[in-house]
Amino acid sequence: MTATASDTSVDLGSPLTVPHLQRASGPLPVLVGSDVLDRVERGRAYLRTVLADDERPVYGAKTGFGALVGFAGRSTEADQCDNTLAHLGAGQGPDLPLDIARAALLVRTWSLAQGLSGVSAHVVAGLSAMFATTFVPAIPRYGSVGASGDLIPLAYAAQALRGRGHAYLDGVRRPAADALAAAGLTPLQLDGRDALALVNGTSVTTAALALALSSVRSSHLALADLTCLLVDVVGADPGFTDPRLISAFGHPGGVTVAGWMRSMLDGTTPSGLRALQEPYSIRCAPQLLGASEDALRYADSVVAADLAGVSDNPLFFPDDDLIAHGGNFFGQPAAFAADVLAMVTASLGNLAERQLDLLVDPARNTGLPPMLAAGPGQQHGLQGVQLATTAFIAEIRRGVLPASTQSLPTNLHNQDVVPFGTQAALRAYDLAELLRLLCGSLALGLRQAVHVGGRRPTAPRCAALLDALASAIEPVDPDRPLDADVRVAAEVVVSRQW
């Protein structure tokens, strides 16, 4: 098939992007061009040549795995595949979110398609065919240390693709063999090298980090918008975003964010009722959000490098007649980036929580009723929502302990240092969802503030955001459960469809 990339497909001969990973949660055409097949087949042919030479060792094809590399592997290729995967069936816990599982396999497919892993061409073709369906391997969350790749979770993925274990089809968990048959997919036939190449990369870590980063980036932008709406609703002076002031601060992220905020606040008129200097949750927002932007750019660079790189061991370079045994399956870059992302999430979440706290407090909200209640005492407005945001922040703070510094030796000290990137990335993914809910909580508060006496925004873009929230959410009058409203508000502000 001739591969032509589009907004709705992935070409394995072109760069992989975060939007590709997001779209992989549903059916997605993955195109395998002749150039991709040629380089995969060339790498495979070179592997065959090397395997025929008894004097050239090849890890995992002729040997045991990990600490048992000094022992011979099994005698047949099919047995060597089982030898690779069976002992890795030790994962525990709930299944990974399905979007992470699908994204991880897309990352793995792209890496194998670069032709440096020595895999069979039918493996790349079979993986690509899976993405046209809703098939998702059931992968337990716990078991990877992010070194030697995400061995245990990817082993479950490989087994499901062989028709073993469990998988999801159309969101329903069922035996993998049944799911494959119902999806019209053929179980993958793997030899030892194919199996090892499928598991010997940090694709779960990369996928979880990329999806978490995308979510946090959306919330970061939403929080900049919400800060501006807060400024306008309470009538604060936007002078803290002055370009001369922010330029003197000297940080590029601050310059960027303050520019966003000035655009959002264009046309606002201060009420003259606020103090000369606002609390830090307003006045220092460009500096906090700007520092977050700088940190997010670092995480962007790590994700981009991971998506453009080959994560496997060993790698095969036919042009140089080289089998390179090394550590390209070591997820330290992603571990550092995910830890930074968690710290950013905590700071952004804290900002959202503090801004909502300001908004519900009559001592600081320019005279609005306590808890933004439409009839305090008879009604309680945002009291429950504000309580929940405190719980969200406590949960985020509990999860911010860096994972990348927690190395523990394992595998008979073969893996004597490990990055724990998988834990860091999955934790960042979880925290990103809490940040989204914090944004939704603040957005709901701002919508309610105008209902109970806050001024209508004077900046056109702020007014447009308020109108979008008002169209999606009724005023809290009388009291009602607000859990669904928080999620609706989050979708409005994060999607920026206003």
Image: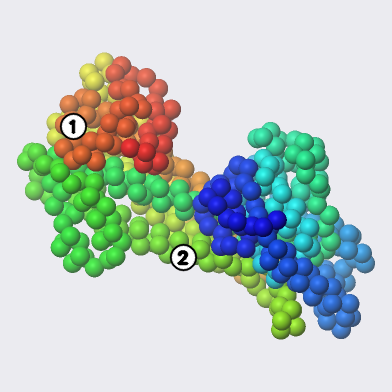
Indicate the secondary structure of the residue bearing disc 1.
loop
Residue 85 against residue 23 in the figure, above or below? below
Q: Which mark is residue 301?
A: 2
- Pointer 2 or 1: first along the chain: 2
What is the quadrant of the N terminus in the image?
bottom right
- Alpha-carbon distance for marks 2 and 1? 40 Å
Q: Is residue 219 left or right of residue 15?
A: left
What is the quadrant of the C terminus in the image?
top left
Residue 108 position in % (x across, y down):
66, 58
* Residue nearer the viewer, 453 or 498: 498
**Residue type at tag 2:** Ser
Residue 334 position in % (x across, y down):
53, 62
Residue 437 position in % (x across, y down):
41, 38
Indicate the secondary structure of the residue bearing disc 2.
helix
Taking the spot 93% from the left edge, 67% from the top edge, the residue there is 75
Taking the spot 37% from the left edge, 19% from the top edge, the residue there is 480
Taking the spot 83% from the left edge, 78% from the top edge, the residue there is 50
**Residue type at tag 1:** Arg
Q: Is residue 323 left or right of residue 8?
A: right
User: Could one spot residue 407 in this view of the protein?
Assistant: no
Residue 269 position in % (x across, y down):
11, 41
Q: Residue furthest left?
A: 272
Q: Which residue is identified by label 1?
A: 456
Taking the spot 32% from the left edge, 31% from the top edge, the residue there is 469
